[in-house]
Amino acid sequence: MLGPDSPAPLRRRQWLRGLAWGAAAALPGAGGAAAGTTIRLSHVVAPDTPKGLTLERFRALVEARSGQRLRVQIYPQGQLYGDQDEMQALQLGAIDMVAPSLSKFGPIGFPEFELFDLPFLFDSVADVRRLTQGPVGQRLLDRLGRQRLLGLGFFDNGFKHMSANRPLLEPADFVGLRMRVQASRVIAQQMRTLGANPVTLPFSETRRALESGVVDGTENPVSNFWTQNMQAVQKDLSLTQHGYLGYAVVTHQRFWLNLPGTDRALMQQALREALDYGNSIADAHNDKALAALRASGAVRIHTPSAAQRQRFKAAVMPVQADLARRIDPAWLHAVREALPPPLAG
């Protein structure tokens, strides 16, 4: 495995720095807002996913309300930066905004965000919003300021399900499988607890890795599974609904403070409306993707029984204790206070 200072990552960091220096003239403070400002926004999923559609709505609102004086250039599907380097690109100024999954914040020094990765923490999206739209969510966004990042808001992609080339309905079904995961210690520990081997890969490389046999399975909301055509390389989708996948829209304080106050206000309002829109469509898009998968007949779809879900929950409970050893216990206490008692089953 390559270390952080091995030649390939080092060359990548040098290249990113070069892009950042070259992009400095494009910052609003350099060119002046009156002459027009292009906001570069990078993400790693398809344009027709809930995330892609949310960010497209943001682009349309900003450009219409600014009379095209503010332009938002969106780079989807990791075209510009992928899972491994989008946060570094933002910090170096090579990109202006990103919309990473919440798992991405743990590896850069904010393990508290991995609360959202805990298996079976949430019974519904309404539970998620008790955190993201309440004091816990605001405290999490505020913490990003320690690295001069600015969190602008949260939005959903719904719940994740397990896929492989066999049903994954019991803990024993995972034993020995190589499962693709995001760079989250919580998700990796979840897989180890089930007896699987976690393999950290960028989202953009996941389908190819499944096709080539580098990994055996993965976890995704149904909309991501469908838009990436994973049914062509995975025979079984198990509707485990074990974990949540959400995002935050993030910018850098340097970029944000170089914008005139009126432009910041315009963008904040556009983003609030876009995030509300995104949250309103996430469930519908996952339902539509599931219906399309059923109609295609290309994948076997399994629904665990109440007893199977209970065994699954019990098997992954140690993951919460592992996270509790790595973060301030006050975070888990605040989450438990904010959420209703878990449902049975």
Image: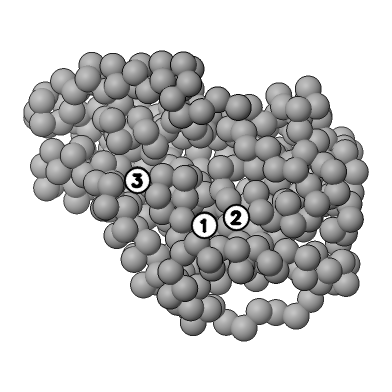
The circle drawn on residue 170 is: none
Which residue in the protein does label 1 denote?
Answer: 114
Closer to viewer: mark 1 or mark 3: 1
Residue at (75% x, 43% y) in the render: 197
The amino acid at mark 3 is Val
* Cβ atoms under marks 1 and 2 closer than 8 Å: yes
Q: Quadrant for residue 311, please give it.
A: bottom right
Image quarter of the N terminus:
top right
Residue at (11% x, 42% y) in the render: 260
Q: Residues within 10 Å of mark 2 (few under 14, many from 20)?
A: many
Which residue in the protein does label 2 denote?
Answer: 186
Which residue in the protein does label 3 denote?
Answer: 250
**Which residue is at the front of the view, 128 or 14?**
14
Q: CA distance from mark 1 to mark 2?
A: 6 Å
Mark 2: which secondary structure? helix
Q: Quadrant for residue 17, please give it.
A: top left
The amino acid at mark 2 is Val
Left or right: where does residue 204 sit relative to residue 242?
A: left
The amino acid at mark 1 is Glu
Q: Is residue 337 positioned above or below 84 on the image?
A: below
Q: Position of residue 319 (x, y in %)?
A: 65, 63
